[in-house]
Amino acid sequence: MTKIFMSLAAVFGGLSVAAGAFASHALKEKLSERALEIFEVGARYQMYHALALLLVAILLSQSQSPPASLIVSGWLFIIGIFIFSGSLYALSLSDIKILGAITPLGGAAFMAAWGALAIAAFSYQ
């Protein structure tokens, strides 16, 4: 799991930088100000949670017997990035309003991931 989480954290972090640059250069003249804001929120939250996933990977690498909640936390961060940031990218680029209804599911995955990380913290001795 450590390699998977660390690799995905690096990929998500790099893609977040690319998405931010893409938004500020290529999309600035093509999207409305609101759509651009939505896209940038997706990129920002992707970076935050890529860093959180990196933390999970580091914690996993330091533990011989990691709590299951730590692994659950990592997977929930991944799911959250796909659903939350992915739906915001799609919404801003397509203007399909129903995609905004999916975004809270990603937010819920993020909150559950942070909760699982908190549970994991209490499992350490």
Image (cartoon, rainbow, N blue to C red):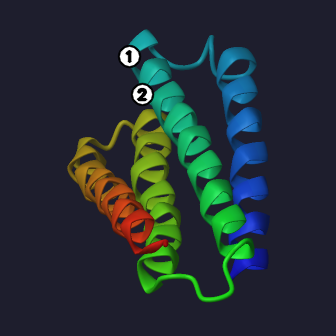
What is the crowding at mark 2: few (fewer than 14 residues within 10 Å), some, or many (at least 20)?
A: many
Q: Is residue 71 above or below residue 111?
A: below
Q: Which mark is residue 51?
A: none
Residue at x-position 41% and y-position 74%: 123
Residue at x-position 49% and y-position 74%: 70
Q: Is residue 96 above or below residue 119?
A: above
Q: Is residue 20 above or below residue 109?
A: above
The amino acid type of the residue labelled 1 equals Arg
How far apart are the alpha carbons under marks 2 and 1? 6 Å
- Residue matched to label 2: 38
| Horizontal side, residue 3 vs residue 120: left or right | right
Residue at x-position 62% and y-position 13%: 28
Give residue 100's position: percent from left, percent from top.
26, 44
Give residue 46's position: percent from left, percent from top.
56, 44
Please, what secondary structure does the residue beneath circle 1 have? helix
Which residue is more in the foreground, 37 or 14?
Answer: 14
Give residue 95's position: percent from left, percent from top.
36, 36
Which residue is more in the foreground, 69 or 123?
Answer: 123
The quadrant in which the N terminus is found is: bottom right
- What is the number of callouts on the image? 2
Residue at x-position 75% and y-position 65%: 6
Q: Which mark is residue 34?
A: 1
Q: State if disc 1 and disc 2 touch (CB < 8 Å).
A: yes
| Horizontal side, residue 63 vs residue 112: left or right | right
Q: Is residue 73 above or below residue 66?
A: above
Please, what secondary structure does the residue beneath circle 2 have? helix
The amino acid type of the residue labelled 2 equals Ile
